[in-house]
Amino acid sequence: MKVDHFGFNTVKTFNQRYLVADKYWKKNGGSILFYTGNEGDIIWFCNNTGFMWDVAEELKAMLVFAEHRYYGESLPFGDNSFKDSRHLNFLTSEQALADFAELIKHLKRTIPGAENQPVIAIGGSYGGMLAAWFRMKYPHMVVGALAASAPIWQFEDLVPCGVFMKIVTTDFRKSGPHCSESIHRSWDAINRLSNTGSGLQWLTGALHLCSPLTSQDIQHLKDWISETWVNLAMVDYPYASNFLQPLPAWPIKVVCQYLKNPNVSDSLLLQNIFQALNVYYNYSGQVKCLNISETATSSLGTLGWSYQACTEVVMPFCTNGVDDMFEPHSWNLKELSDDCFQQWGVRPRPSWITTMYGGKNISSHTNIVFSNGELDPWSGGGVTKDITDTLVAVTISEGAHHLDLRTKNALDPMSVLLARSLEVRHMKNWIRDFYDSAGKQH
């Protein structure tokens, strides 16, 4: 694969990894479901996208999972890919979409029978954004896209910056009495306890942290705890799962059992917070201490993502402590810009994504299904109402982050079964329309 699709003075190429499954593929009247890989190892995404495997037979589909450049094993400069911003210069959504286009061309050229078949882009989260953008930018390559939990409007001021954390808070508020209230109270309790050396020592022990806290660590500690609550909101699935971490069914309900009483002493509240955090970090019971530098699986490429968040994928978030259970924090672009410059030597371009992909003005496009779970904080930046009759929103009332892309489960709520059947119906229509118009041309 070319390292740079848009310039002509580097001829450098790299190996891009992709997976193909053709067990149910039919050369006659079949289709190709193309997973637009996102910020992590493609095998991990493949194993967490059971929906594609579940519908392959019905759609006579070949499954293709394409790894996103700079993640997993698809590293344009090998071990040097993250050395500096010069090597990272080719980590953009545009280059990734061009990779996907070239890969589809390659597959159609090299797999007998694939040439005249319809391709559908499928992705979740950032991958869902890529699936939607791929249909917008390369409509001749894919007949449609399923964009699951794709926050394509979490940019600039397209949606209020506080909506994300508001949804996280609602999930906790609805999962147990006084749950969000206990979390809301915990921040000041941490601030008070961390005022003294003995308090810091006590906190380190009470939270079973791997390394002793200093007063400089307190903001980092609170950010780590906040991120834990966010991750729980994303993976609040109706059955036991292992997406970001091994977790029980409806994990927020389990967490909230420890947070029923906000009106306790600071030290008791923090001991309860530890029990709650332990559900997320130590459900398996194997963990000896909690590390405040880790929140999710190592299958996700955090280095690459931090560069993308510093350049193109600039998503404003804020909290006010009134509509949400967090400490007030306003959106501060300058602070982000300075952090990014310090880490990568680059500055963010907050309005480029809307220039490139249209922001809310996307009604000229067709054949995209946007699905969102109401429990998923990312739904706040997603398309949750139909835009036209072919740009369709599907809402999953009991769904967290792209529940619909996960494999079917006996505990699936009715809302996700309905969502999947709608998604399949749209895909069948796109495939049928493709073959109808191909038939007319001959």
Image (cartoon, grey):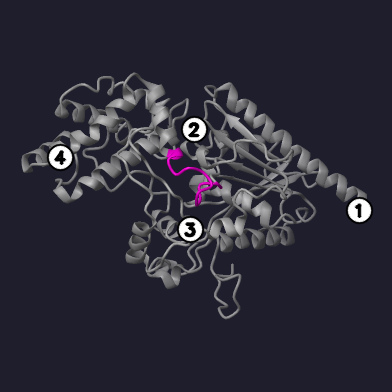
Asked if the residues shown at circle 1 and circle 3 are in contact, with their CB atoms under 8 angstroms apart, the answer is no
> Counting other residues with Cα less than 10 Å from the Cα at mark 4, is it few (<14), some (14-19), or many (20 or more)?
some
Count of picture labels: 4
Q: Which marked residue is nearer to the observer: mark 4 or mark 3?
A: 3
Report the front residue among 352 and 235.
Answer: 352
Q: Position of residue 239 (x, y in %)?
A: 46, 26
Q: Is 33 drawn above or below residue 96 in the view shown?
A: above
Query: Is residue 185 visible in this depiction of the protein?
Result: yes
Q: Which residue is mark 3?
A: 350
Q: Does the magenta stretch mainly form a helix, a strand or a loop? A: loop
Report the front residue among 301 and 135.
Answer: 135
Give the secondary structure at mark 4.
helix
Q: Is 200 drawn above or below residue 113 in the view shown?
A: above
Give the residue drawn at x 49%, y 59%.
Answer: 312
Q: Which residue is mark 1?
A: 441
Span shown in magenta: 152-164
Going by the numbered disc 3, the residue's amino acid type is Pro
Assess whether residue 220 is covered by the magenta stretch.
no
Assess whether residue 153 is covered by the magenta stretch.
yes
Mark positioned earlier in the residue sequence (1 or 4): 4
Query: Is residue 207 visible in this depiction of the protein?
Result: no
> Counting other residues with Cα less than 10 Å from the Cα at mark 3, is it few (<14), some (14-19), or many (20 or more)?
many
Q: Which residue is mark 2?
A: 400
> Counting other residues with Cα less than 10 Å from the Cα at mark 2, is it few (<14), some (14-19), or many (20 or more)?
many
Mark positioned earlier in the residue sequence (2 or 3): 3
Going by the numbered disc 2, the residue's amino acid type is Ala
Q: Which residue is mark 4?
A: 204
